[in-house]
Amino acid sequence: QSVLTQPPSVSAAPGQKVTVSCSGSSSNIGNNYVSWYQQLPGTAPKLLIYDNNKRPSGIPDRFSGSKSGTSATLGITGLQTGDEADYYCGTWDSSLSEVVFGGGTKLTVL
Amino acid sequence: EVQLVESGGGLEQPGGSLRLSCAASGFSFSSYEMHWVRQAPGKGLEWVSYISQSGSTLCYADSVKGRFIISRDNAKNSLYLQMNSLRAEDSAIYYCVRDIRVGAVNFDYWGQGTLVTVSS
């Protein structure tokens, strides 16, 4: 059971938009920055979003992040088949004094 | 180019020990916090341990506390994870990870991972 809660899967058609939610509490998302990671099959995770809503260089603006209260959301527009991957949210938990991740969300582009 | 290359994984019996290494290059290693993150086959990401730039501050997940020891050698641009009293549930790919900055969890570079299998 992960500290951060993500839907196990989401799906949408090519060209459409999808959102992935990440729910936590005041000890983690509520008072700390959230980051998002994309893991393509058989590869290491890759940073997509940091500090809630910032994109590292090289990440297209089709990817966006937001945070409100104790929840965070990853948005992906203009879906491509190459976006099929597992997506994870992560943050620091001040009560546990640990880094915590969501359980991961598998994106299927139909 | 930033590179993180893990080594030291393999098959070990329950109760045994392994030492993982991570060779860093392409950046000022001593300026960055570093972490180990693991992923069991078919499962999600699990944070294992953290070390500050100087090595003076260490943090561990409860699941490995008292059994694993993280360390670094800034002169050798290397990160280590000493894994003792291994259990079957420690079987996973172990990633060496760089954190962008102090005060936030922003893992901007990941190694390719090294596989640890604990089995008799």
Image (cartoon, coloured by chain):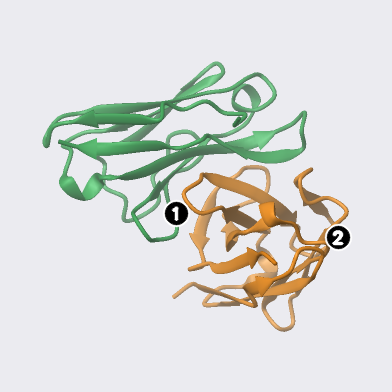
Chain colours: A green, B orange
Which mark is in front, 2 or 1? 1
Image quadrant assignment for residue A106: top left
Residue marked by disc 2: B56
Q: Are marks 2 and 1 on the same chain?
A: no
Q: Is residue A35 left or right of residue A9?
A: right
Query: Which quarter shows the C terminus of chain A?
Result: top left
Q: Chain of mark 2?
A: B
Q: Chain of mark 1?
A: A
Which residue reaches farthest top? A69
Q: Is residue B112 left or right of residue B114?
A: left
Q: Which mark is residue B107?
A: none
Q: Nearer the viewer, residue B74 or B41?
A: B41
Residue drawn where x is 56% and y is 18% of the image: A70
Q: Is residue A94 left or right of residue A49?
A: right
Q: Nearer the viewer, residue A21 or B26?
A: A21
* Residue A44 percent coordinates (x, y): 44, 59
Mark count:
2
Could you tell me the amino acid type at mark 1? Pro
Q: Residues within 10 Å of mark 2 (few under 14, many from 20)?
A: few
Q: CA distance from mark 2 to mark 1?
A: 27 Å
Give SS at disc 2.
loop
* Residue A50 percent coordinates (x, y): 48, 42
Residue drawn where x is 37% and y is 60% of the image: A42
Q: Is residue A44 above or below residue B65?
A: below
Q: Nearer the viewer, residue B22 or B38?
A: B38
Q: Is residue A79 above or below residue B30?
A: above
Query: Which quarter shows the N terminus of chain A?
Result: top right
Residue drawn where x is 61% and y is 73% of the image: B28
Q: Which mark is residue A45?
A: 1
Give SS at disc 1.
loop
Residue drawn where x is 63% and y is 59% of the image: B91
Q: Residues within 10 Å of mark 1 (few under 14, many from 20)?
A: many
